[in-house]
Amino acid sequence: MIVRHFLRWVQTAPAGERAEATSALARAYLYSELEREDRLAAEAAMTVLLDDPSPLVRRALAEALGAAAEAPHGVVIALAHDQPEIAEIVVARSPMLNEAELVDLVGAGSERMQSAVAARAPVSPAVAAALAEVGSAAACLVLLENPVAQPTASGLARIAERHGHLAALRDALLARPELPPETRQALVAVFSETLARFVTHREWLPEERAKRVARDACDRATVTIASEISNDDDVAALVHHLRTTGQLTGGLILRALLAGNVRFLVEALAELTGMEPPRVAGIVTDRGGHGFRAVYQRAGLPPAAFLAFRAALEVINEMGFTADKQSHAILRRRMIERVLTRYESAAPDELDQLLALLRRFAAEAAREEARSYTADLVVAA
C-alpha cells in the first residue's frame, strides 16, 4: 500500500524530492525488516525508477545500492549501463557484478567505465587481464596503482607492450616487484629508444652517436636486471626474450661475462645452440677449455670475438666462479684489464672494433670503481 502511494506521488513530485524519496526507499529495502510482499513491491518500485527522466533520481538509487550485497541484481545491472556519472558509482563498488559482467563492461565500456572497474577492490586476474588487453592507458594506470588488483605476469607484459612508451605507465610497472625480468628489460629498451630519438631530435648528439649511447645504457641495465635474478628459469626467460627481440648480441653477452655473470653466458649459449644448460655449463666451466670453441661456433657468435670470450673465461677460472650476484651487474676493472692484455697480444689488428669495445668497457669499469671509491670516502667522512 505504501509503495503504491509512493509510485503515484513520484509521477508529479519535483526531481529533488523524488531523489530523496528514492534514496529512502532503497535504504528501507536494504536495512528494514519488510514483509515479503512489501519487499517485492519495493523492488518493483526501484525497477520503475530506472526509467525516471531525472539523473538525480537514478543517481540516488545508485548511491544507495552501490556497495550493497543485498541489492537487486537486475537493478544493479541496469544502473551499470546508465550514463557514465551514474554507472561508475555501481561499477566501482557493487559486489553484485560478477567476473563475466565486469569483463563485458571493460570490453564495451568507455575509458571512464574501464577506470571504474580497475579501481574495484579487489580486481580478479581475469578482469585484470581484460583491462590489460583492451583497457585505455588511464584505466591501466588505475589498475597498476590499485593495491588489491591481481594482474598476472602476462597481463603486466601486455600493458608494457601497449602502453610502455608512456612515462607514467612505465614508472608504475617498474615499481612493481613482481614484474617479470623480461618485461622490465622490454621497458628499459623502449625507454632507451625514446631517449635516443629525443636527443637526436633536439640535435644534442648525432643520430648514430645517440643510438650507441642508448644501446650501451640499455645493455648496462639488462646486465643489472640479469644480476638480480635468483631463478635459473627466469634467466632463461630473459635470454629468450632478448633473442626474440634481436637484443642478444655478442657485445651484451661479453658485457655480462666481464661482470662475472657466467650463468648469463650459459643460458645464452643454451638458447642459441639448443643444448641443455647443464651440458653447456659443464663445457664453460671446464678449466681445460675443451669444447668451448665448438659451442661458441654453434651459437653463431662473432668469430672475431672468440679470443676475448676465451680470455675472459680463463681469467674467471683463475679468479674463481665465486663472485657474488651483486657484482654481476658491474664491469670489473681488474678482470677487463687482464682480458685486454691477453687479447691485445693475440688480436690480429690493433684497430679492430672488439678491441675498441674492450677499451670502452675498461674505461666504464674505471669510472664505476672511481664512483664507488669516492662514495666510500664521503661515507667515511
Image (cartoon, grey):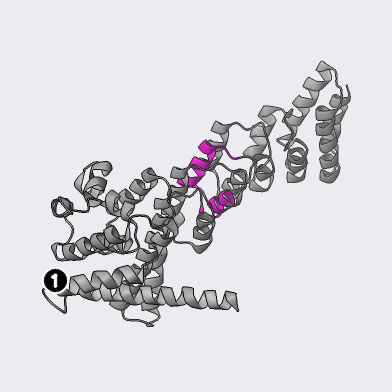
Q: Residues within 10 Å of mark 1 (few under 14, many from 20)?
A: few
Secondary structure under tag 1 reads: helix
Residue found at x 31% / y 68%: 335
Q: Is residue 191 magenta?
A: no
Q: Which residues are magenta?
A: 123-144
* Farthest residue, direction top: 36
Foreground pick, 119 / 113: 119
Judged left or right of residue 36, residue 335 is left
Residue found at x 59% / y 40%: 123
State the image coordinates of residue 311 (x, y, percent, origin top left): 21, 64
Dominant secondary structure of the residues highlighted in magenta in the image: helix
Residue under label 1, please give it.
346
State the image coordinates of residue 62 (x, y, percent, origin top left): 73, 39
- Residue 36 vertical placement versus 180 (above, below): above
Disc 1 residue type?
Ala
Judged left or right of residue 286, residue 215 is right
- Residue 342 vertical placement versus 103 (above, below): below
Quarter of image, res 121: top right
Foreground pick, 347 / 140: 347
Quarter of image, res 224: bottom left
Residue found at x 57% / y 48%: 143
Report the quarter where the N terminus lies.
top right
State the image coordinates of residue 67 (x, y, percent, origin top left): 73, 37
- Residue 165 vertical placement versus 5 (above, below): below
State the image coordinates of residue 252 (x, y, percent, origin top left): 29, 62
Report the quarter where the C terminus lies.
bottom right
* Farthest residue, direction left: 348
Residue 378 in sight:
yes
Judged left or right of residue 48, residue 208 is left
* Farthest residue, direction front: 318
Residue 354 in sight:
no
Q: Is residue 140 magenta?
A: yes
